[in-house]
Image (cartoon, helix red, strand yellow):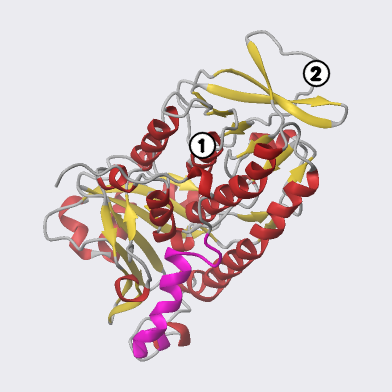
Amino acid sequence: MAVVGGGPAGMVLGLLLARGGIDTVVLEKHPDFLRDFRGDTVHASTLTLLDELGLGSAFAALPHRLLEEAEVQLDAGTVRLADLGRSLPGLHRHVALVPQWDFLEMLADAAAAEPHFTLLRSAEVVGLVHDAGRVAGVRWRDYRPPAAEDGAAQPAAAGRSAAGPGPSEHLLAADLVVGCDGRWSAVRAGAGLEPRAFGVPVDVEWFRLPRHPGDPDGGVGRLSGREFMIMIDRGDTWQCGYLIAKGQDEALRAEGLGAFRARLARLQPWLADRLDAAPERLDDVKLLDVRIERLDTWHRDGLLLIGDAAHPMSPVGGVGINLAIQDAVAASRIVGQRMRHSPGPVPEDVLAELQRRRLPPTRLVQAFQRLAHRGVVNRALRGALATSATTLPLPLKLLARFPVLQRIPARFIAIGPRPEHAPSWARRLERLGPR
């Protein structure tokens, strides 16, 4: 099997399949996993999965923070949205915040111990191989990044389908190609698949600020007037997302760095002591073009797409990574089980079974995100959302007045509407040393 993309979904899928004795090659475009502003949340359901895979101790050794509640700071006070510590079942009653590159390297190290696993780094997929109408592999070349690469830029489509590889290209034949290459999926474009887009009213400007002793722990949401920012605790820094109306990036940059810093100081006054030096320049502020999209069909003969390649998500709730990993686990159980017992090309009805299982939770999560965009985020940016304690929108008012209701968003965010568990053949017992 060829898995395109070494993000969370691709690495989890590669590890699970290799443990099932399926020869699996993961092709990662970059030479390493070091990319700015990737999602750093590892949800409770993923932490449970790591325990099932015997990787709980390896994860615990990574530098990480634990988020046990989600709050939003209003001008009139703080409203708790979700209490994970009191609401979730099992051992993991939190969401972990960990640099994604550390998480991916941990998965890569675990997979490297499996004889059926290969990770190709600096391997850029540039085309799909076809045989009698079915996808039968990929073409890839050694990746050489441009001088000034923009991590948010859309890659070129992997659309070529000539008979043989071009100069400096390599061919990898596969019984199944799985596209895990994200929201700008080159595999999806190469297959001629066009996702259906749902209107999104916002974009996000990502940047970092120093974190000082005495700052709040975990995650912070701040809403005031027409401005809205989220802040993710990464130890010595804050990863910040400042929300803007869709298409307003150019206007914000035209105002200049000083005006942007002034916005932040006005929104979150306790940041003022560090804004003279950060962000150092507007080039350090990266635009995330927020999209909610979904393919009507996630597969073709010989091809499957999962995660953001099949259903790009909004960052609302930070649930995109969790959903993608659960897609990968379900794929290992449904598609991997077929390949273990019947080697060779995977029938398309098996791929359709995977979509049938994962489509309902995807629709539900995206509906929640669209509702949040319309009911909270968009209204906040238009100044139409009152932020006093007595005039909150009804959902926030109910969460504040009846704490038991906080269990609903806690479970929805940290576990998801349909959690998946590792197949029995991929599980490992922890080897614990003497205490």
Magenta-highlighted residues: 398-419
Q: Residue at x 20, y 41 (%)?
A: 433
Residue 238 is situated, as x and y percent measured from the top left of the image, at 27, 52
Q: Nearer the viewer, residue 163 or 327?
A: 327
x, y percentage for residue 97? 32, 53
Residue 414 in the magenta stretch? The answer is yes
Tell me: residue 386, above or below residue 125: below
The amino acid beneath tag 1 is Arg
Question: Is residue 248 found inside the magenta-colored segment of the image?
Answer: no
Front residue (pair 270, 143): 143
Q: Secondary structure at mark 1?
A: helix
Which residue occupies 33% across, 87% down?
389
| Residue sitting at the far top | 167
**Which residue is disc 1 drawn over?**
19
State how far apart marks 1 and 2 are (Cα).
34 Å
Q: Residues within 10 Å of mark 2 (few under 14, many from 20)?
A: few
Identify the disc placed on residue 163.
none
**Main SS of residues in magenta:** helix
The secondary element bearing badge 2 is classed as: loop
Name the spot of residue 402 as percent of width and height, x first: 37, 89
Q: What amino acid is labelled 2 in the image?
A: Ala
- The residue closer to the viewer here, 18 or 176, is 18
Verify CB contact (< 8 Å) between mark 1 and mark 2: no
Report which quarter residue 265 is drawn in: bottom left
Q: Residues within 10 Å of mark 1 (few under 14, many from 20)?
A: many
**What residue is shown with label 2?**
162
Q: Residue at x 69, y 39 (%)?
A: 341
* Quadrant of residue 346 within the rendered picture: top right
